[in-house]
Amino acid sequence: MSVQWTNYFFFLACCSGLGFGSPNRCDEVRKVFQLRQIGPNQLLPLGPRPGSDLQVCMSKNLTCCTKKMEEKYQVAARRDIQNLLQTSSSSLKFLISRNVAAFQDTFDVLMRQAENHTNVVLKESYGNMADQAVGPVRELFTDIGLFLLGSEFNVDDLVQRFFDALFPLVYNHLINPGLSDISQGYAECVRSSSREVRPFGGAPGLLADQIARSGVSGKLLLQALHLGIEVINTTDHLQLSRECRRALLKMHYCPHCQGFTQSKPCMGYCLNVMRGCLASMAEIDAHWREFVRSLEGLSARMHGPQDFEQVLLGVHTLLHDAVGHAQKNGPRLSAQVHKLCGLPSRKPAQSVSIQHSSSSSSRESIPLKAVVRASGDSLAVRRRDFLNSLRLYRTYYGGLADQLCVSELASGDGLSCWNGTNIVKSYTLRVVGNGIKAQSTNPEVKVKGADPVINQIIDKLKHINQLLQGKSIPKLGSLDQIETGSGDTEGRYSGDCDDEDGCGGSGGGENKRKVPRVSKLSPDVAGDHKHHHHHRHYPPAEDSEMQDRSRSLGLTGAIWVLIMPCLHMLLAL
């Protein structure tokens, strides 16, 4: 009997030496599991258990995890990293979105100011004709606004339509005024003759050229900013490969299975995992830098004839001069119109509406009021302020993995950390660089190739950069013709979410895609990857054995080796 009691006490002593003793570490795991709402409580074991059924969080020690918990942890790890990506890009996305709205609002205000000022000038200079010109003037500025927002208008046509509509009014009120207006049929003939008799000289061509030059720049600016938002949306919802998801699970939640709920990954370990997972995003870096530089170049060219604000606010002057040109050439134009349309056919006289040429000519000398430009709201000031802010994010994609590790994920210097297997003092494996090519030696994540959706967004960046730089692109066509893959968000990685992955029961609906290779980036890109967040550089280290394991883990491992005899002794009892 005494021998049996001795055996029981020996067994209890063995068990009390485990890391899962009192207080039970699995209790802390349970609290965190519930607090983060990772899954239902029923998935949790009552206490430490062997983990032979685990796929990723395998350990020689007892574990606080079940296979179902591991599946939930993998879903949580993927969700955590996508939330981090969206949080890290939120300020950049807000910067671009806010300025897209601000530029569009400024364009709208400028359009209304230019339209109103044009109507005022016509009214001051040409009286009753201006009332009938309100409709064509409104249509002109509406078409300009639609062109700016992306409509495929031919600028020459929309400007010529305006001057065609204006000519019957000028003829009726200034060139050949009468007791009543010309008939609708005669007005249509006068309108049709406009392109032949050219009553406004070179004004239509000049205005079309100014709108095309400045409007294309403004249109391109908005188009580029919308693409910037699309790039961010694409990378915010990056589809993670199976290897990446397993690595994230191992880094974030496998230490929980051993009771280390407060541990953080070692810096080098975190960099390897995140640089592997975000390798495709790092390929955007060179093209994003060029995108920022190209926007700066476009902005620098937006002055004089390419300053949309200046062109819009100068329409009234050009229009005033064009009408004056037609009025001065009235006799010639009247003869040409009579030759093409015959003598004027007028509506029945209802009221006297005579514009004497003397009074009309006297109005030409009315001085035009200069348009006051509020510098605080001008497009040039908005562009300058925006680009100064955007410049801070030019290295965003090159340093994203490092930024996330330094600011959010990894353990600080000098602190014990998780290396994927145990709690250690430092990570001793080689730390790889950024980008697809550098991942060939990554010890934590196998990267097969570039994400095809990222490749497509890179193609769009290349295209817009060439447009911003004024280069012709005969093969790519318009920006909208480049497929983004946004309609194929279910594009899938091959081998995703199998039984080994442990996500079959999570309902995660993981994606499978064939992954083509991406072209190599220039070597000078990798050197300049500092984000505006400060981070350290970690030189690669040679592979070696893990060092300085924590004493508690060593003791736990040793006791686990001893527990087997204890179990055998109990069975013998």
Image (cartoon, rainbow, N blue to C red):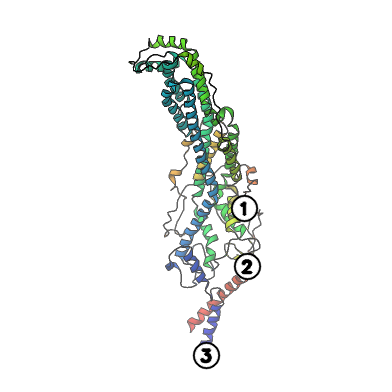
Report the front residue among 33 and 197. 197
Q: Residues within 10 Å of mark 3 (few under 14, many from 20)?
A: few
Query: SS for tag 1?
Result: loop
For residue 303, side relative to residue 148 (left or right) = right
* Distance of label 2 from label 3 (alpha carbons): 39 Å
Q: Residues within 10 Å of mark 2 (few under 14, many from 20)?
A: some
Q: Residue at x 48, y 56 (%)?
A: 79
Query: SS for tag 3?
Result: helix
Q: Which residue is mark 3?
A: 2
Report the front residue among 100 and 237. 100
Q: Is residue 194 above or below residue 106?
A: above
Q: Find out whether the residues at labels 3 and 1 contact each other: C-beta distance under 8 Å.
A: no
Q: Of the residues under marks 2 and 1, which one precedes in the sequence?
A: 1
- Comparing labels 2 and 3, the label whose residue is closer to the camera: 2
Q: Residues within 10 Å of mark 1 (few under 14, many from 20)?
A: many
Q: Find out whether the residues at labels 2 and 1 contact each other: C-beta distance under 8 Å.
A: no
Query: SS for tag 2?
Result: loop
Q: Quadrant of residue 549?
A: bottom right
- Residue 326 in sight from this viewpoint: no
Q: Is residue 518 above or below residue 565?
A: above
Q: Quadrant of residue 348?
A: top left
Q: Amino acid at mark 2?
A: Arg
- Residue 35 in sight from this viewpoint: yes
For residue 412, side relative to residue 499 (left or right) = right
Q: Position of residue 72 (x, y in %)?
A: 46, 61
Q: Which residue is mark 1?
A: 432
Q: Which residue is mark 2?
A: 549
* Distance of label 3 from label 1 (alpha carbons): 61 Å
* Distance of label 2 from label 1 (alpha carbons): 23 Å
Q: Is residue 499 above or below residue 138?
A: below
